[in-house]
Amino acid sequence: MSLIDWKDDLSVQIVEIDNQHKKLLNLINELHDAMKTGKAKDVLESIIQKLISYTKSHFATEEKYFKQFNYPLTNEHIKEHNDFVNNVSDFQEKFKAGKLGLSIEIMKFLTTWISKHIQETDKAYSEFFIENGVK
């Protein structure tokens, strides 16, 4: 069973970005399922690698639109992206060092990201992008 299911309140009304956000939810649910069955340690390295890949493609998509349309909150938004990348790098280092409880730390970080970043920061650009023709 999923920890987080896609709902309309998560949508930024831009198909490309919503589809990318759904991939992040899938990663959260994959980690959650592994945690429930005591297999988090087995999937953690893969989850971290997928998060690194996700950040590269997803953040590039958003930042492309920021630049293209001169989004007024670009600097603040990119700072949050950079913080996310730094956190994932931290998780990777902690994993390599054998830190215990890392799956819980990652899960808390990602679920907070959904509620704070996607539902607040990303939603802030939704209308702006749509007004500029992004669908």
Image: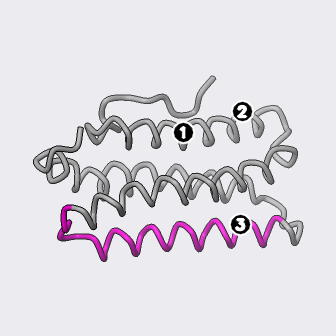
Q: How crowded is mark 3: few (under 14 residues within 10 Å), some or many (20 or more)?
A: many
Residue tagged 1: 23
Mark 2 residue type: Asp
- Residue occupying the point 52% across, 49% down: 111
Depth check, front residue: 70 or 27: 70
Percent of width and height locating residue 59: 45, 59
What span is in magenta? 69-95
Secondary structure category for the residue under label 1 = helix
Query: Is residue 66 rendered to the left or right of residue 70?
Result: right
- Image depth: mark 1 or mark 2 in front: 1
Q: Residues within 10 Å of mark 1 (few under 14, many from 20)?
A: some
Query: Is residue 112 rendered to the left or right of residue 99?
Result: left
Quadrant, the N terminus: top right
Q: Residues within 10 Å of mark 2 (few under 14, many from 20)?
A: some
Mark 1 residue type: Lys
Dot placed on the residue nearer the N-terminal end, 3 or 2: 2
Residue tagged 2: 33
Secondary structure category for the residue under label 2 = helix
Q: Residue 91 carries which label?
A: 3
